[in-house]
Image (cartoon, grey):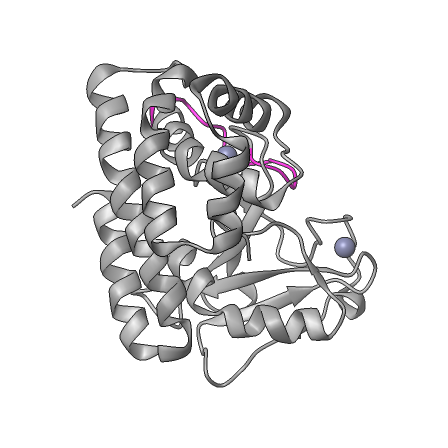
Amino acid sequence: MTNYDVRIARANALASDHPASAPLLKFYCELARFQKPIFSELDARNETDLRALVCHFPALIQLVSRSGTQLLANFAAERLQGTEAQLDLLSAAWEGGEVVEPAGRFYARVLLQPFAEYLASRGDIQASGAGPTCPFCNARPVAGVLRGEGDGGKRWLLCSLCSTEWQYRRVLCPGCGEENKDKLPIYTAAEFPAARVDACDSCQTYLKSIDLTKDGHAIPMVDEIATVALNIWAEEHDYVKLETNLLGM
Ligand SMILES: [Zn+2]
Ligand SMILES: [Zn+2]
């Protein structure tokens, strides 16, 4: 089983446990099924050139027109006609790390994620002693991952782009460096025993952490999507997510 198969299986399992998140998880499954052969192809060809991704735009645009939002479909119709515009978007997202428009970020990330994951799988990553951004590709984390019980438990951050995990202190805000425990509230909800919101009252950002000691079957990238109800809660309390997930949430 590849990472993508594991994610797809987890998303299917969570969709039946959490009907409210099922539409999101189903869309995510479609995206992961689309990404899987891209990763395999890059891997098989030792391909490290961004331009190899451009040929996948038509199928992605079609997938979105079938299963995505009108907003995403409109963006493709207006802004992603022709390989030049498509490559420009990919390059901007890859080199600059930031594409301001959420719809543009969505398209870029669906394609860049398997590309970055493939490159990370080749690289020798120094995953310890890293800062608040990914030690491999410098993108921001999309979630925390908790392993090990109690005070000795450790936290990793999960890269939003290449899925590298790196260890990060448990009581330290990746948004602003706050380390005062009283300013770093944690919120949980009974509905999601293995997820929590790690918020920061200094910079008003939050990320969710997935606690693998509470659910050994959790796949952080997918469980992060399934627990979108926690995002709504956090945003109602004026916290802004440090980094959106693949679906832009
Ligand atoms: Zn990364
Ligand atoms: Zn902060």
Magenta residues (range): 121-134
- Seen from the viewer's position, the closer of residues 176 and 76 is 76
Instruction: Work out which quarter of the rendered image holds the C terminus and state it.
Output: bottom right
Quadrant for residue 27, please give it: bottom left
Residue 128 is a magenta residue: yes
Name the residue: 48% across, 54% down.
Answer: 70
Spot occupied by residue 222 in the image (x, y as percentages of width and height): 38, 58
- Left/right of residue 93 with respect to residue 113 in the rendered view: right
In-image side of 174 versus 220 (left or right): right
Which residue is rendered at x = 51% and y = 45% of the image? Answer: 74
Say if 91 sits above or below 148 in the image.
Answer: above
| Secondary structure mainly formed by the magenta segment | loop
In the image, residue 93 sits, relative to residue 149, either above or below, namely above
The answer to which of 77 and 142 lies nearer the viewer is: 77
Question: Residue 211 at what x, y percent from top left?
Answer: 45, 66
In the displayed structure image, the side of residue 15 where residue 236 appears, left or right: right
| Residue 23 visible at all | yes
**In this figure, what is the number of numbered marks?**
0
Residue 25, above or below 30? below
Q: Position of residue 11 (x, y in %)?
A: 30, 62
Is residue 230 shown in magenta? no
Q: Is residue 193 left or right of residue 144?
A: left
Which of the pair 115/148 is nearer the observer? 115
Q: Is residue 166 visible?
A: no
Q: Position of residue 20 (x, y in %)?
A: 41, 78
Front residue of this view, candidates 170 and 116? 116
Residue at the image point whose x is 34% and y is 28% from the top: 118
The single residue placed furthest to the right in the displayed view is 202
Residue shown at the point (74%, 74%) measured from the top left:
237
